[in-house]
Amino acid sequence: MTHYTITVPVKYDDNGTEKTAYRRVGAAFENTKRDTGETFLTIKLDFPVGATELVAFQPSTRDVTE
């Protein structure tokens, strides 16, 4: 089963330089409808998120516990 890590972009200032970090908030799982073969994503959040933007990345091989 293909899955993606769902993150929220967090901008911060690092000595005058604006940077962006990505905080994990959940996972999205790629599924296929049996009758039509259509692909869709199911998103499972780790906790309630009050965000206006979510960013999905393919999972990395390292363990991310943020």
Image: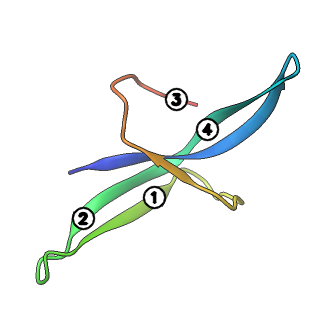
Tell me the tag on residue 65.
3
Q: Residues within 10 Å of mark 2 (few under 14, many from 20)?
A: some
Q: The disc labelled 2 sits on which kind of residue? A: Asn
Tell me the tag on residue 31.
2
Question: Looking at the picture, how far across and down is residue 8, in whole percent?
Answer: 62, 47
- Helix, strand or loop at label 2? It is strand
Residue at (71% x, 40% y) in the render: 10
Tell me the tag on residue 32.
none
Tell me the tag on residue 23.
4
Instruction: Answer with mark 4 or mark 3, whichever residue precedes in sequence.
Output: 4
Measure the C-alpha gap from mark 4 to mark 1.
15 Å
Where on the picture, by quarter, is residue 49?
bottom right
In the displayed structure image, the side of residue 61 where residue 66 appears, left or right: right
Measure the C-alpha gap from mark 4 to mark 3.
9 Å
Q: The disc labelled 3 sits on which kind of residue? A: Thr
Q: Residues within 10 Å of mark 1 (few under 14, many from 20)?
A: few
In the displayed structure image, the side of residue 55 where residue 52 appears, left or right: right
User: Is residue 2 positioned above or below 63 on the image?
Assistant: below
